Amino acid sequence: MKNGWSPKKLQREIVLSAVYRQSSEERADVVAVDPANKLLAVYPRKRLEAEELRDSLLYASGELDETIGGPAVFPKVPSSLVAGNVLNNGQGGALWEDAKDPNDHKRRSIYTFVRRSLPYPLTASFDPADPSKPHHKRDVSTTALQALTLFNSDVVFGWSQALAGRVISEAGANENAQLDTLYEILFSRKPTREEKSALKGFLKEQEKLVESKAWTDKFEVAVPTGLKDTKNLDPFKAAAFVDLVHAVANSNEFAYRF
């Protein structure tokens, strides 16, 4: 009220406050005094909302189409989800027809078409607003289905391939530089010595696994996408890096605000 009801000044005061800038790391002295964190001695962790999470993954991968305005779009959904489902308007037509323009699949989530009878599956597990009910606050849940949704989604894996390609393009062939760039894009920091050691160990094991499975009839090597030069690209090493990117992008540090 003293600042003329300015929301910007209020937001500035909040984000510059000591409470807002607290770390989320657990401290023994704080737990002993305030185990429920009612005094806000540490910043309460909060998962990104459904649309924020999808848009963040798109942005990190370099795939986000930032076109503003226009009609709602229909991103890709599993074909099994809409099989046999038609509109009950006497004219037929599928409940969800994927957009013909591939760029529409990469638009911000605010432009995704909302159908009460068929929520967009990628964000449905992350407590989006239910269009069939009036409410003023979203539910916040933490379930195993959320992790499985991201990890098993073909769409998210495709974004991981694009992110892997972006990292290689920006960092070059140096493994240390690639790991640093990956963490800077996703977490705005570089990996610690312990984290980098674990990441390199994962790459070695995964490269062996990919190579051992590559000769089977039903296995396809998923390499980074968006690279201009792939002549010197080792497909097994590149596929292992895609798996690493996919795993790191699905970590809590990316999905939560700490």
Image (cartoon, rainbow, N blue to C red):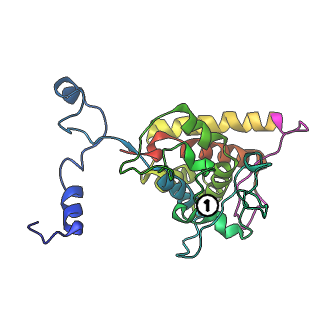
Magenta span of residues: 213-232
Locate the N terminus and report the quarter of the image it occupies: bottom left
The picture quadrant where one finds residue 109 is bottom right
Locate the C terminus and report the quarter of the image it occupies: top left
Instruction: Judge from the rendering whether residue 122 lies leftward or rightward of residue 80; answer left or right.
Output: left
Q: Which residue is mark 1?
A: 166
The residue drawn where x is 8% and y is 67% is: 2
Q: Position of residue 8 (x, y in %)?
A: 24, 68
Q: Position of residue 103 (x, y in %)?
A: 66, 69
Q: Nearer the viewer, residue 241 or 173?
A: 241
Is residue 244 a member of the stretch shown in magenta?
Answer: no
Residue type at numbered disc 1: Arg
Instruction: Judge from the rendering whether residue 99 lies leftward or rightward of residue 246; answer left or right.
Output: right
Instruction: Judge from the rendering whether residue 22 lies leftward or rightward of residue 72; answer left or right.
Output: left
Q: Position of residue 252 (x, y in %)?
A: 47, 40
Up-down relation of residue 140 to residue 71 (above or below): above
- The answer to whether residue 113 is seen in the rendering is yes
Instruction: Judge from the rendering whether residue 216 lies leftward or rightward of residue 146; answer left or right.
Output: right
**Residue, far right:** 217
Q: What secondary structure do most residues of the magenta stretch adopt?
A: loop
